């Protein structure tokens, strides 16, 4: 199996960290009218 040296498996925690970094200003959660961004989530 030839794996690129930049490859890193995407775990649920890594996904949340990446989302917070890449999409920091986007809304991640809306609950009872309160919006939370990816950076705050």
Image (tube, rainbow, N blue to C red):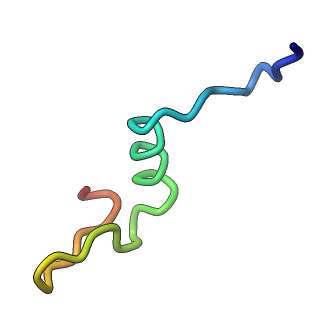
Residue name at image x 82 percent, y 23 percent: 4
Q: Residue furthest bottom?
A: 33
Q: Residue furthest left?
A: 32
Q: Is residue 19 left or right of residue 2?
A: left
Q: Position of residue 15 (x, y in %)?
A: 47, 43
Q: Residue furthest top?
A: 1
Q: Position of residue 26 (x, y in %)?
A: 41, 72
Residue name at image x 16 percent, y 76 percent: 31
Residue name at image x 11 percent, y 82 percent: 32
Which of the image's four quarters has the N terminus?
top right
Q: Position of residue 14 (x, y in %)?
A: 45, 36
Q: In which image quadrant can residue 12 be found?
A: top left
Which of the image's four quarters has the C terminus?
bottom left
Q: How many marks?
A: 0
Q: Residue furthest front?
A: 1
The answer to whether 25 is drawn above or below residue 20 in the figure is below
């Amino acid at each position: 199996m030839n794996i690129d040296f930049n490859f890193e498996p995407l775990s649920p925690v890594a996904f949340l960290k990446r989302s917070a970094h890449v999409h920091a200003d986007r809304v991640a959660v809306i609950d009872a009218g309160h919006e939370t961004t990816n950076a705050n989530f």
